[in-house]
Amino acid sequence: MRLLLLFFCGCLLAACNRQTAAVASVPSPTPVAKAQPTPAPFRPGLGPTANDTSLLWRIEMPGVAQPSYLFGTIHLIPEKDYFLPGRVVKAINDSEAVFFEIDPRDMQNPAKIMGLLTRINMRGDTSLEDLLEPEAYATVENYFTESGLPFFIFKRMKPLFLSAMVGQDLEAMQGGEGMTAGGMKSYEMELTELAEAGGKSIGGLETMEFQLGLFDSIPYRAQATMLYEAVVADQGSETGDLPSEMERLVAIYRRQAVAELASTITEESAGVARFEELLLTKRNANWVPIIQQNMGALNAGAGFYAVGAGHLGGDRGVIALLRSAGLTVEPVY
Protein backbone atom coordinates (compact mmCIF):
# COMPACT_ATOMS: atom_id res chain seq x y z
CA MET A 1 0.00 0.00 0.00
CA ARG A 2 2.95 2.33 0.62
CA LEU A 3 3.74 2.60 -3.11
CA LEU A 4 0.12 3.48 -3.79
CA LEU A 5 0.24 6.23 -1.17
CA LEU A 6 3.46 7.62 -2.63
CA PHE A 7 1.68 8.16 -5.93
CA PHE A 8 -1.52 9.54 -4.47
CA CYS A 9 -0.53 11.70 -1.49
CA GLY A 10 2.72 12.90 -3.01
CA CYS A 11 0.92 15.00 -5.59
CA LEU A 12 -0.90 17.05 -2.95
CA LEU A 13 2.16 17.40 -0.73
CA ALA A 14 4.43 18.45 -3.56
CA ALA A 15 1.91 21.00 -4.77
CA CYS A 16 1.34 22.40 -1.26
CA ASN A 17 5.03 23.22 -0.95
CA ARG A 18 5.32 24.95 -4.29
CA GLN A 19 7.08 28.29 -3.76
CA THR A 20 6.77 29.98 -7.16
CA ALA A 21 3.68 32.03 -7.93
CA ALA A 22 3.73 32.56 -11.69
CA VAL A 23 1.04 30.00 -12.47
CA ALA A 24 -1.77 32.49 -11.99
CA SER A 25 -0.70 34.36 -15.12
CA VAL A 26 -0.99 31.34 -17.39
CA PRO A 27 -4.12 31.38 -19.59
CA SER A 28 -6.90 28.92 -18.83
CA PRO A 29 -7.19 25.78 -20.95
CA THR A 30 -10.18 25.01 -23.13
CA PRO A 31 -12.88 24.22 -20.54
CA VAL A 32 -13.99 20.67 -19.99
CA ALA A 33 -17.59 19.74 -19.32
CA LYS A 34 -18.74 20.05 -15.73
CA ALA A 35 -20.84 16.90 -15.94
CA GLN A 36 -19.56 13.72 -14.31
CA PRO A 37 -17.65 11.85 -17.04
CA THR A 38 -18.93 8.52 -18.28
CA PRO A 39 -16.49 5.86 -17.04
CA ALA A 40 -14.12 4.56 -19.69
CA PRO A 41 -14.85 1.13 -21.20
CA PHE A 42 -12.73 -1.83 -20.20
CA ARG A 43 -11.24 -4.65 -22.27
CA PRO A 44 -8.45 -6.84 -20.88
CA GLY A 45 -5.04 -7.25 -22.50
CA LEU A 46 -4.56 -3.69 -23.77
CA GLY A 47 -2.03 -2.44 -21.23
CA PRO A 48 1.68 -1.80 -21.86
CA THR A 49 3.99 -4.82 -21.96
CA ALA A 50 7.37 -5.37 -20.33
CA ASN A 51 8.98 -4.20 -23.59
CA ASP A 52 7.22 -0.81 -23.45
CA THR A 53 9.82 1.05 -21.46
CA SER A 54 8.77 4.64 -21.95
CA LEU A 55 7.16 7.25 -19.72
CA LEU A 56 5.97 9.32 -22.70
CA TRP A 57 3.10 8.10 -24.91
CA ARG A 58 1.48 9.58 -28.02
CA ILE A 59 -2.35 9.57 -28.14
CA GLU A 60 -4.20 9.69 -31.47
CA MET A 61 -7.98 9.90 -31.79
CA PRO A 62 -10.02 9.34 -34.97
CA GLY A 63 -11.13 12.63 -36.48
CA VAL A 64 -8.55 14.67 -34.57
CA ALA A 65 -5.57 15.78 -36.63
CA GLN A 66 -3.18 16.63 -33.81
CA PRO A 67 -1.94 13.93 -31.41
CA SER A 68 -1.74 14.52 -27.66
CA TYR A 69 0.73 13.17 -25.13
CA LEU A 70 0.60 11.23 -21.88
CA PHE A 71 3.54 11.36 -19.47
CA GLY A 72 4.04 9.39 -16.28
CA THR A 73 5.49 11.34 -13.36
CA ILE A 74 6.72 10.49 -9.91
CA HIS A 75 5.44 13.19 -7.63
CA LEU A 76 8.55 13.35 -5.44
CA ILE A 77 11.97 12.00 -6.41
CA PRO A 78 15.50 12.41 -5.00
CA GLU A 79 17.23 15.18 -6.91
CA LYS A 80 20.10 12.88 -7.87
CA ASP A 81 17.63 10.55 -9.63
CA TYR A 82 15.67 13.24 -11.46
CA PHE A 83 15.78 13.13 -15.26
CA LEU A 84 13.69 14.65 -18.04
CA PRO A 85 14.19 13.31 -21.58
CA GLY A 86 14.37 15.86 -24.36
CA ARG A 87 11.39 14.25 -26.09
CA VAL A 88 9.24 15.22 -23.11
CA VAL A 89 10.30 18.85 -23.37
CA LYS A 90 9.55 18.76 -27.11
CA ALA A 91 6.10 17.29 -26.49
CA ILE A 92 5.30 20.13 -24.08
CA ASN A 93 6.59 22.68 -26.59
CA ASP A 94 4.37 21.12 -29.27
CA SER A 95 1.28 21.25 -27.03
CA GLU A 96 -1.17 24.05 -26.43
CA ALA A 97 -2.35 22.91 -23.00
CA VAL A 98 -0.75 20.99 -20.14
CA PHE A 99 -2.95 19.06 -17.72
CA PHE A 100 -1.99 17.63 -14.35
CA GLU A 101 -4.01 15.57 -11.88
CA ILE A 102 -4.72 18.87 -10.08
CA ASP A 103 -4.55 22.36 -11.57
CA PRO A 104 -1.36 23.83 -9.99
CA ARG A 105 -2.97 27.27 -9.84
CA ASP A 106 -5.24 26.00 -7.09
CA MET A 107 -2.15 25.87 -4.89
CA GLN A 108 -1.71 29.63 -5.31
CA ASN A 109 -5.29 30.39 -4.28
CA PRO A 110 -5.31 31.45 -0.59
CA ALA A 111 -8.94 30.41 -0.14
CA LYS A 112 -8.26 26.92 -1.46
CA ILE A 113 -5.09 26.59 0.59
CA MET A 114 -7.07 27.43 3.72
CA GLY A 115 -9.65 24.87 2.69
CA LEU A 116 -6.88 22.29 2.35
CA LEU A 117 -5.48 23.08 5.78
CA THR A 118 -8.88 22.75 7.42
CA ARG A 119 -9.41 19.34 5.83
CA ILE A 120 -6.05 17.81 6.74
CA ASN A 121 -7.24 16.97 10.23
CA MET A 122 -9.67 14.20 11.15
CA ARG A 123 -13.27 15.00 12.02
CA GLY A 124 -14.24 15.75 15.58
CA ASP A 125 -11.60 15.25 18.22
CA THR A 126 -10.27 11.97 16.79
CA SER A 127 -6.57 11.48 17.44
CA LEU A 128 -4.09 8.94 16.07
CA GLU A 129 -3.77 7.70 19.63
CA ASP A 130 -7.41 6.55 19.42
CA LEU A 131 -6.74 4.45 16.32
CA LEU A 132 -3.59 2.45 17.14
CA GLU A 133 -2.56 0.09 19.88
CA PRO A 134 -0.22 1.78 22.39
CA GLU A 135 2.91 0.03 21.09
CA ALA A 136 2.12 0.89 17.47
CA TYR A 137 1.32 4.48 18.39
CA ALA A 138 4.62 4.79 20.27
CA THR A 139 6.46 3.54 17.19
CA VAL A 140 4.89 6.21 15.01
CA GLU A 141 5.35 8.95 17.60
CA ASN A 142 9.03 8.11 18.10
CA TYR A 143 9.62 8.01 14.34
CA PHE A 144 8.50 11.59 13.84
CA THR A 145 9.95 12.88 17.09
CA GLU A 146 13.39 11.48 16.22
CA SER A 147 13.14 13.30 12.90
CA GLY A 148 13.06 16.57 14.78
CA LEU A 149 9.36 17.38 14.51
CA PRO A 150 7.05 17.85 17.53
CA PHE A 151 4.55 15.05 17.01
CA PHE A 152 1.70 16.76 18.84
CA ILE A 153 1.02 18.87 15.74
CA PHE A 154 0.38 15.67 13.72
CA LYS A 155 -1.76 13.66 16.15
CA ARG A 156 -5.06 14.79 14.61
CA MET A 157 -3.87 14.80 10.99
CA LYS A 158 -5.51 12.27 8.67
CA PRO A 159 -3.12 9.29 8.71
CA LEU A 160 -3.23 8.85 4.93
CA PHE A 161 -1.83 12.34 4.45
CA LEU A 162 0.75 11.77 7.17
CA SER A 163 1.84 8.53 5.48
CA ALA A 164 3.16 10.48 2.51
CA MET A 165 5.63 12.23 4.82
CA VAL A 166 7.25 8.94 5.83
CA GLY A 167 10.69 8.62 4.27
CA GLN A 168 10.90 12.33 3.42
CA ASP A 169 13.42 14.84 4.77
CA LEU A 170 11.37 15.99 7.75
CA GLU A 171 14.16 18.19 9.12
CA ALA A 172 14.15 20.17 5.87
CA MET A 173 10.38 20.58 6.18
CA GLN A 174 10.80 21.85 9.75
CA GLY A 175 13.24 24.46 8.47
CA GLY A 176 10.61 25.70 6.03
CA GLU A 177 12.36 24.31 2.98
CA GLY A 178 9.38 22.20 1.90
CA MET A 179 9.31 18.73 0.42
CA THR A 180 10.98 19.83 -2.77
CA ALA A 181 14.10 20.89 -0.88
CA GLY A 182 16.48 18.67 1.01
CA GLY A 183 17.47 16.82 -2.15
CA MET A 184 13.93 16.15 -3.45
CA LYS A 185 12.30 17.38 -6.65
CA SER A 186 8.75 17.38 -7.97
CA TYR A 187 8.03 16.57 -11.61
CA GLU A 188 4.82 18.58 -11.37
CA MET A 189 6.76 21.67 -10.35
CA GLU A 190 9.39 21.21 -13.06
CA LEU A 191 6.81 20.62 -15.80
CA THR A 192 4.72 23.55 -14.64
CA GLU A 193 7.73 25.84 -14.98
CA LEU A 194 8.26 24.56 -18.53
CA ALA A 195 4.59 25.16 -19.35
CA GLU A 196 4.73 28.67 -17.89
CA ALA A 197 7.87 29.50 -19.83
CA GLY A 198 6.15 28.44 -23.05
CA GLY A 199 2.92 30.30 -22.28
CA LYS A 200 0.92 27.09 -22.25
CA SER A 201 -2.55 26.75 -20.80
CA ILE A 202 -2.61 24.71 -17.60
CA GLY A 203 -5.45 22.66 -16.16
CA GLY A 204 -6.37 19.68 -14.00
CA LEU A 205 -8.15 16.39 -14.59
CA GLU A 206 -9.77 16.58 -11.18
CA THR A 207 -10.08 19.07 -8.36
CA MET A 208 -8.17 19.37 -5.12
CA GLU A 209 -11.50 19.00 -3.31
CA PHE A 210 -12.13 15.67 -5.03
CA GLN A 211 -8.73 14.31 -4.07
CA LEU A 212 -9.13 15.41 -0.48
CA GLY A 213 -12.55 13.78 -0.42
CA LEU A 214 -10.91 10.44 -1.15
CA PHE A 215 -9.10 10.70 2.18
CA ASP A 216 -12.47 10.61 3.92
CA SER A 217 -13.57 7.55 1.93
CA ILE A 218 -11.05 5.33 3.73
CA PRO A 219 -11.78 4.60 7.41
CA TYR A 220 -9.41 6.38 9.77
CA ARG A 221 -8.45 3.14 11.50
CA ALA A 222 -7.41 1.62 8.17
CA GLN A 223 -5.43 4.77 7.38
CA ALA A 224 -3.70 4.54 10.76
CA THR A 225 -2.71 0.93 10.07
CA MET A 226 -1.23 1.94 6.72
CA LEU A 227 0.73 4.72 8.44
CA TYR A 228 2.16 2.33 11.02
CA GLU A 229 3.15 -0.18 8.32
CA ALA A 230 4.83 2.61 6.31
CA VAL A 231 6.84 3.69 9.36
CA VAL A 232 7.93 0.12 10.13
CA ALA A 233 8.93 -0.44 6.50
CA ASP A 234 10.97 2.77 6.43
CA GLN A 235 12.68 1.90 9.70
CA GLY A 236 13.60 -1.50 8.25
CA SER A 237 15.17 0.11 5.21
CA GLU A 238 17.39 2.26 7.44
CA THR A 239 19.30 -0.87 8.52
CA GLY A 240 20.70 -1.11 4.99
CA ASP A 241 19.55 -4.71 4.60
CA LEU A 242 16.84 -3.89 2.06
CA PRO A 243 16.18 -0.98 -0.27
CA SER A 244 13.44 1.38 0.90
CA GLU A 245 10.14 1.43 -0.95
CA MET A 246 11.07 4.83 -2.33
CA GLU A 247 14.32 3.37 -3.67
CA ARG A 248 12.41 0.47 -5.24
CA LEU A 249 9.93 2.86 -6.79
CA VAL A 250 12.63 5.17 -8.15
CA ALA A 251 14.60 2.25 -9.62
CA ILE A 252 11.56 1.05 -11.56
CA TYR A 253 10.74 4.60 -12.62
CA ARG A 254 14.24 5.25 -13.93
CA ARG A 255 13.90 2.08 -16.05
CA GLN A 256 10.66 3.63 -17.35
CA ALA A 257 9.04 0.23 -16.84
CA VAL A 258 5.40 1.29 -16.54
CA ALA A 259 4.05 -2.28 -16.77
CA GLU A 260 6.35 -3.45 -13.97
CA LEU A 261 5.39 -0.45 -11.88
CA ALA A 262 1.67 -1.17 -12.22
CA SER A 263 2.10 -4.85 -11.33
CA THR A 264 4.30 -3.95 -8.34
CA ILE A 265 1.66 -1.59 -6.97
CA THR A 266 -1.07 -4.19 -7.51
CA GLU A 267 0.92 -6.93 -5.75
CA GLU A 268 1.93 -4.63 -2.92
CA SER A 269 -1.70 -3.53 -2.44
CA ALA A 270 -3.23 -7.02 -2.64
CA GLY A 271 -4.47 -6.89 0.95
CA VAL A 272 -6.26 -3.58 0.44
CA ALA A 273 -7.62 -4.00 -3.08
CA ARG A 274 -10.68 -1.85 -2.37
CA PHE A 275 -8.41 1.13 -1.71
CA GLU A 276 -6.43 0.59 -4.91
CA GLU A 277 -9.77 0.69 -6.74
CA LEU A 278 -10.58 3.99 -5.03
CA LEU A 279 -7.21 5.71 -5.42
CA LEU A 280 -6.20 4.43 -8.87
CA THR A 281 -8.59 2.53 -11.10
CA LYS A 282 -11.76 4.60 -10.67
CA ARG A 283 -9.81 7.79 -11.20
CA ASN A 284 -8.22 6.34 -14.35
CA ALA A 285 -11.67 5.58 -15.72
CA ASN A 286 -12.84 9.13 -14.98
CA TRP A 287 -9.87 10.73 -16.72
CA VAL A 288 -10.22 8.96 -20.08
CA PRO A 289 -13.46 10.67 -21.26
CA ILE A 290 -12.04 14.02 -20.12
CA ILE A 291 -8.95 13.41 -22.27
CA GLN A 292 -11.18 12.45 -25.20
CA GLN A 293 -13.30 15.57 -24.82
CA ASN A 294 -10.24 17.79 -24.52
CA MET A 295 -8.70 16.28 -27.66
CA GLY A 296 -11.83 17.20 -29.57
CA ALA A 297 -11.88 20.71 -28.12
CA LEU A 298 -8.15 21.18 -28.81
CA ASN A 299 -8.40 19.94 -32.39
CA ALA A 300 -6.02 22.65 -33.56
CA GLY A 301 -3.38 21.78 -30.97
CA ALA A 302 -2.09 19.00 -28.76
CA GLY A 303 -2.67 18.43 -25.07
CA PHE A 304 0.00 17.14 -22.68
CA TYR A 305 -1.20 15.05 -19.73
CA ALA A 306 1.13 14.49 -16.76
CA VAL A 307 -0.13 11.98 -14.19
CA GLY A 308 1.52 9.62 -11.74
CA ALA A 309 3.26 6.81 -13.63
CA GLY A 310 1.41 4.28 -11.50
CA HIS A 311 -1.74 5.22 -13.42
CA LEU A 312 -0.33 4.25 -16.84
CA GLY A 313 0.14 0.48 -16.82
CA GLY A 314 -2.11 -2.50 -16.19
CA ASP A 315 -5.39 -3.65 -17.71
CA ARG A 316 -7.23 -0.80 -15.97
CA GLY A 317 -4.53 1.82 -16.43
CA VAL A 318 -5.00 4.97 -18.48
CA ILE A 319 -3.22 3.55 -21.54
CA ALA A 320 -5.37 0.40 -21.65
CA LEU A 321 -8.58 2.36 -21.11
CA LEU A 322 -7.72 4.86 -23.86
CA ARG A 323 -7.08 1.97 -26.23
CA SER A 324 -10.31 0.32 -25.16
CA ALA A 325 -12.12 3.55 -26.04
CA GLY A 326 -10.78 3.36 -29.60
CA LEU A 327 -7.76 5.67 -29.34
CA THR A 328 -4.27 4.74 -30.53
CA VAL A 329 -1.66 5.00 -27.76
CA GLU A 330 1.97 4.26 -28.58
CA PRO A 331 5.23 4.79 -26.66
CA VAL A 332 7.55 7.62 -27.74
CA TYR A 333 11.24 6.65 -27.62
Image: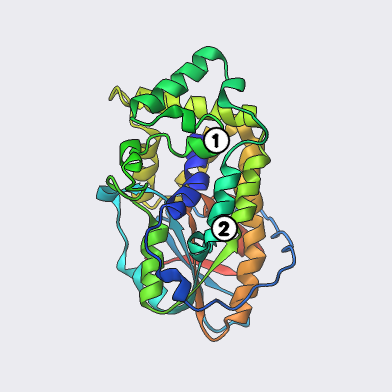
Looking at the image, the residue that sits furthest to the top is 135
Q: Residues within 10 Å of mark 2 (few under 14, many from 20)?
A: some
Could you say whether the residue bearing mark 2 is in a helix, strand or loop?
A: helix
User: Residue 291 occupies which quadrant of the picture?
Assistant: bottom right
The type of colouring in the image is rainbow
Could you say whether the residue bearing mark 1 is in a helix, strand or loop?
A: loop
Quote the CA–CA distance across marks 2 and 1: 18 Å
Q: Residue at x 39, y 48 (%)?
A: 76
Q: Amino acid at mark 2?
A: Lys
Vertical placement of residue 179 versus 65, above or below: above
Q: Residue at x 57, y 21 (%)?
A: 129
Image quarter of the C terminus = bottom left
Mark earlier in primary sequence (2, 1): 2
Give the camera-side residue of 332 and 172: 172
Residue 202 screen position, x and y as percent: 50, 71
Image position of 276 (left or right of 313) = right
Q: Residues within 10 Å of mark 1 (few under 14, many from 20)?
A: some
Q: Residue at x 55, y 33 (%)?
A: 159
Residue identified by numbered label 1: 157
Q: Residue at x 48, y 63 (%)?
A: 108
Residue 40 screen position, x and y as percent: 69, 60
Vertical placement of residue 307 versus 198, above or below: above
Residue identified by numbered label 2: 112
Are the residues at dot 2 and dot 1 in contact (C-beta closer than 8 Å)? no
